[in-house]
Image (tube, helix red, strand yellow):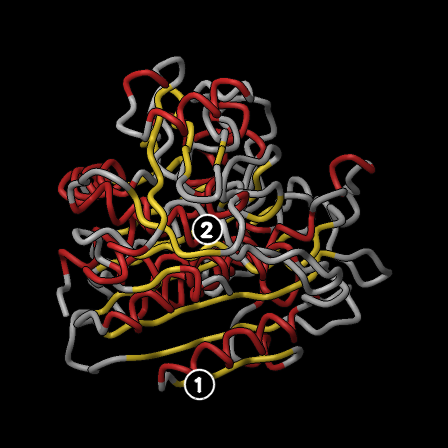
């Protein structure tokens, strides 16, 4: 989708393409654009406001506002008429690659159910851009968005499995899936308990790729394809966008696609527990005690905190392989949104070197993340009088922290573990980022992993 909107740099193509001039807000006079274009733009009220676009048919202006949005060129891709364009001026490699990615993101359309007008403006990539990197990132972002945007009626556990199989087939990976009652036989009791009430059978998707002797990297993604809240049923507003509760699964599949496409030197494993948290006479209940793969007994405080239960079994499985690095991504808590809002991706890790590498990569890729504390002082909030652990704290404090502390109990066999409590959704549109499903942190993670496990 949209990949044909970006072509590799060629000097002859760049020389004949229409130039796009960036204009800061209120600085039209400072632009290098032709005087006649600036005069016409001024007469039409163009001032350089972020996302504003103006063309006279021969050249174009793009408003970059205060220059804080690295993907602002998506607005030009969205609004300019068909034709070949090139960015005027010079950009360093990082900025040029982000501009190319922004242009590609301007071509994203979720058109499975409704025909959408496609973007038609084509960009000759800046000479300094890493076009392969921009295309790889766009593919990953689009996959994550498409999976999250698809309604639960068409993205149940079986459809999520098929998405994993499609990705595996494209890259020569292997997939094993444990379904329904076999989850009990193969010791995934909490995945089974959460998903057993739904008509669609729960499952554990296990994908493997790469040299078996390479460093082991395991990705774990929450795949709750719809979350009613279970017997602790959500209200209407809380349930409205719960098709996105498989956002963690969408993210690990998208990240896996980037890793395999780039050929990173890892033994990659992707684990996705895929369930629907439904309501029936067979639903698990508040107060139940569940067995876990790890051997810990878990008291259920609230059936609407189901994601950490299925992740716990998957993390325990991943840890048995003793990977060098295990990363989990999940749309896990509303507390994370209260703390950081919809655009910052909170993460947890005790590995200081890994944290530093991720934060550096996130800054370079304009993919914001924010470290949260694995504060051991809150572990007592998860205590239970009748089980080894309660899966929620029972109070209103530190909900994202206590969720991460719960998961850490099951991820201990990995040499290093990092957890992301993502939102996977944009409530408000921006250039190249329509409202709806959104990819968070995976470009930063890939950049970090690319340096750690180069192809």
Q: Is residue 408 left or right of residue 393?
A: left
Q: Which residue is mark 1?
A: 169
- Residue appearing at x 55%, y 55% in the figure: 119
Using the image, determine if residue 104 lies above or below residue 167.
Answer: above
Alpha carbon of mark 2 to alpha carbon of mark 1: how far? 25 Å
Query: Is any part of residue 256 visible from this angle?
Result: yes
What residue lies at 48% left-to-right and 25% top-to-bottom? 40
Within 10 angstroms of label 2, few (less than 14), some, or many (20 or more) residues? Answer: many
Residue 75 pos. (x, y %): 48, 39
The image shows residue 349 at horizontal and vertical percentages of 28, 41
Q: Position of residue 241 (x, y in %)?
A: 70, 45
Question: SS for tag 2?
Answer: helix
Q: Where does label 2 land, which residue?
A: 105
Q: Quadrant of the C terminus?
A: bottom left
In front: 71, or 141?
71
Q: How many numbered discs?
A: 2
First reached walking from the N terminus: tag 2 or tag 1: 2
Seen as rendered, the residue at the extreme top is 26
Along the line of sight, which residue is nearer the eye, 432 or 346? 432
Determine which of the numbered discs, if any, sits on residue 214 in the image: none
> Mark 2, mark 1: which one is toward the viewer?
2
Residue name at image x 55 percent, y 47 percent: 387
Circle 1 — which element?
A: helix
Which residue, as the protein is rendered here, is positioned at the far right?
A: 281
User: Is 274 placed above or below 354 here?
Assistant: below
């Amino acid at each position: 989708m949209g990949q044909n909107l970006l072509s590799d740099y060629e000097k002859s193509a760049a020389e004949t393409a229409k130039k796009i001039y960036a204009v800061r807000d209120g600085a039209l006079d400072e632009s290098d654009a032709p005087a006649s274009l600036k005069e016409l733009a001024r007469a039409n009220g163009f001032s350089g406001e972020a996302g504003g676009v103006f063309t006279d048919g021969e050249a174009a202006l793009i408003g970059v506002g205060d220059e804080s949005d690295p993907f602002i060129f998506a607005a030009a891709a969205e609004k300019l008429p068909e034709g070949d364009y090139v960015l005027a001026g010079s950009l360093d490699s990082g900025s040029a690659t982000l501009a190319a990615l922004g242009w590609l993101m301007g071509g994203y359309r979720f058109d499975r159910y409704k025909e959408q007008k496609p973007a038609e403006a084509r960009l000759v990539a800046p000479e300094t851009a890493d076009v392969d990197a921009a295309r790889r990132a766009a593919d990953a972002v689009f996959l994550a968005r498409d999976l999250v945007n698809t309604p639960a009626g068409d993205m149940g556990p079986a459809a999520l499995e098929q998405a994993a199989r499609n990705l595996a087939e494209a890259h020569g990976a292997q997939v094993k899936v444990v379904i329904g009652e076999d989850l009990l036989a193969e010791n995934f009791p909490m995945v089974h308990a959460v998903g057993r009430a739904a008509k669609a059978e729960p499952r554990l998707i296990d994908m493997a790729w790469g040299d078996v002797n390479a460093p082991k990297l395991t990705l774990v993604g929450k795949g709750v394809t719809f979350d009613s809240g279970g017997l602790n049923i959500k209200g209407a507003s809380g349930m409205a966008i719960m098709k996105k509760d498989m956002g963690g699964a969408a993210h690990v599949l998208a990240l896996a696609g980037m890793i395999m496409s780039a050929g990173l030197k890892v033994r990659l494993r992707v684990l996705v527990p895929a369930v629907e948290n439904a309501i029936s006479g067979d639903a698990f209940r508040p107060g139940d005690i569940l067995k876990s793969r790890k051997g810990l007994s878990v008291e259920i405080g609230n059936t609407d905190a189901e994601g950490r239960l299925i992740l716990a079994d998957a993390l325990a499985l991943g840890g048995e392989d003793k990977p060098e690095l295990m990363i989990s991504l999940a749309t896990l808590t509303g507390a994370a949104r209260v703390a950081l809002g919809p655009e910052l991706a909170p993460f947890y890790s005790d590995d200081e070197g890994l944290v530093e590498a991720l934060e550096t990569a996130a800054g370079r890729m304009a993919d914001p993340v924010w470290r949260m504390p694995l504060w051991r002082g809150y572990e007592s909030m998860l205590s239970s009088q009748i089980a080894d652990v309660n899966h929620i704290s029972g109070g209103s404090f530190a909900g994202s922290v206590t969720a991460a502390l719960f998961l850490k109990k099951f991820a201990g066999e990995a040499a290093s573990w990092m957890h992301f409590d993502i939102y996977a959704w944009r409530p408000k549109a921006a250039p190249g980022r329509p409202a709806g499903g959104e990819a968070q942190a995976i470009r930063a993670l890939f950049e970090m992993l690319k340096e750690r496990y180069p192809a």
